[in-house]
């Protein structure tokens, strides 16, 4: 494949993920307060986030493995339509059970990230892999710039149902545009068939020496970070008086940092320091930025430490994904990345439930526990082996 064709495919998958993540980002700043109006506390909000992640846990395995068999394009297109349905249910939810069902549907659609990552793995060499994953990360970042701002403002001025309808519309637009311009990336000779109900690939990945530390990091880090995302909006509401609009701008700052770091700086940092070093630094950086929250007394201080958290998270994610894909066989990219995302979804299931309950008992303890667990993730990353890439490698599909 020529460099021009590779860049074109990067652009297509970038905009596909971007539109998808704008829809997801729209929901982020309003969900805590939406849930509170329907009678949910820390545990109830944690259950909503946990339900989303439980479905992601199932879906990443199913969708990643299915994409290894039928290709990436059908999976991405189908989940865009499912996502639209989830957002329509979200907009129509006037009770906690309906809101819960909406998050279950969206959680399944959110499992398509393994197919998107496998798409990037299909069109890059191992030496370029983490840079390619950084492009997905940049789309995430931009989605979190635009999405939370739109969500917070539309909820503030148009009511709580408006963000869900906007997100549903974007999912439909995403489907139409991807249907017209997204080519298939998986070669016929790299397609494999495995039992869709078999979860043994997760155990296999954990037992593979080179993959084991990464897989544990994919479990531990999302546990801590997702628990933080449950506690932070509730803490900011009580301590700083924040509501949807303020939380929307807060997540916009996180998204802007991620877009700059992953879209521009990550590739340069990875070439200089290597993926492993960025992985370790990102893990410990997130641990510190989470644990310090109870000591903060102002919005300015919270924003400052959020910049540290966003930077650390923005180098951790693509480094972890790139290393997993480098260690995986070309015919197993969707399956192994699906295993990593399934473990991440499991962490996002257990983290909100556990730390939401801790928050209900003690607000500061939730951040301290999350920070300690994240530090454990940093320690696990110290066991990730170093990787040497051949010089001058280029994409070939």
Image (spheres, rainbow, N blue to C red):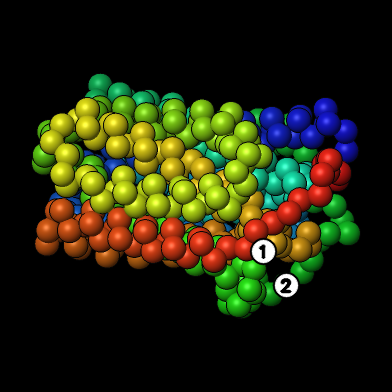
Q: For numbered disc 1, what is the local secondary structure?
A: helix
* Residue shown at the point (22%, 45%) measured from the top left: 293
Q: Is residue 237 left or right of residue 225?
A: left
Q: Dot 1 corresponds to which residue?
A: 335
Q: Are marks 1 and 2 in contact (CB under 8 Å)?
A: yes
* Residue shown at the point (13%, 36%) measured from the top left: 297
Q: Give the farthest residue toward the top.
A: 157
Q: For this rendering, which residue is in front, 197 or 229?
A: 229
| Location of residue 341 (image quadrant) | bottom right
Q: Residues within 10 Å of mark 1 (few under 14, many from 20)?
A: many
Image location (x, y in percent) of residue 330: 78, 59
| Quarter the N terminus occupies | top right
Q: Earlier in the sequence, mark 1 or mark 2?
A: 2
State the mark number for residue 142: none
Res. 4 visible in picture: yes
| Location of residue 123 (image quadrant) | top right
Q: Dot 2 corresponds to which residue?
A: 194
Q: Is residue 221 left or right of residue 276?
A: left
| Quarter the C terminus occupies | top right
* Residue shown at the point (19%, 62%) measured from the top left: 358
How far apart are labels 1 and 2 at the CA level? 9 Å
Q: Is residue 204 above or below residue 313?
A: below
Image location (x, y in percent) of residue 357: 20, 63
Q: For numbered disc 2, what is the local secondary structure?
A: loop
């Amino acid at each position: 494949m020529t460099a021009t064709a590779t860049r074109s495919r990067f652009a297509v998958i970038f905009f596909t993920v971007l539109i998808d993540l704008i829809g997801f980002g729209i929901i982020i700043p309003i969900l805590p307060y939406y849930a509170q109006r329907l009678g949910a506390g820390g545990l109830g909000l944690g259950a909503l986030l946990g339900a989303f992640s439980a479905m992601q846990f199932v879906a990443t395995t199913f969708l990643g493995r299915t994409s290894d068999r039928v290709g990436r394009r059908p999976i991405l297109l189908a989940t865009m339509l499912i996502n639209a349905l989830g957002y329509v249910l979200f907009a129509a939810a006037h009770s906690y059970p309906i809101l819960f069902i909406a998050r279950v549907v969206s959680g399944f659609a959110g499992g398509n990230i393994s197919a998107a990552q496998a798409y990037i793995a299909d069109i890059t060499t191992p030496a370029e892999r983490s840079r390619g994953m950084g492009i997905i990360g940049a789309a995430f970042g931009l989605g979190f710039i635009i999405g939370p701002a739109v969500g917070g403002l539309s909820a503030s001025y148009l009511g709580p149902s408006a963000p869900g309808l906007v997100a549903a519309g974007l999912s439909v637009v995403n489907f139409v545009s991807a249907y017209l311009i997204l080519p298939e990336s998986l070669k016929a000779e790299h397609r494999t068939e495995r039992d869709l109900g078999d979860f043994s690939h997760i155990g296999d990945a954990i037992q593979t020496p080179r993959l084991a530390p990464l897989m544990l990091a994919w479990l531990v880090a999302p546990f801590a970070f997702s628990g933080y995302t449950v506690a932070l909006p509730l803490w900011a509401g009580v301590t700083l008086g924040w509501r949807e609009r303020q939380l929307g701008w807060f997540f916009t700052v996180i998204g802007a940092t991620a877009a700059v770091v992953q879209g521009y700086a990550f590739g340069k940092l990875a070439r200089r320091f290597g993926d492993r070093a960025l992985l370790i630094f990102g893990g410990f950086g997130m641990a510190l930025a989470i644990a310090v929250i109870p000591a903060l007394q102002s919005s300015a201080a919270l924003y400052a430490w959020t910049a540290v958290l966003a930077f650390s998270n923005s180098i951790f994610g693509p480094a972890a994904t790139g290393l997993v894909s480098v260690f995986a066989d070309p015919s197993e990219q969707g399956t192994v990345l699906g295993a990593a995302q399934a473990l991440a979804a499991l962490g996002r299931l257990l983290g909100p439930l556990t730390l939401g309950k801790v928050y209900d008992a003690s607000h500061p303890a939730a951040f301290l526990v999350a920070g300690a667990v994240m530090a454990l993730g940093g320690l696990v990353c110290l066991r990730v082996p170093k990787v040497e890439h051949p010089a001058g490698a280029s994409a070939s599909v």
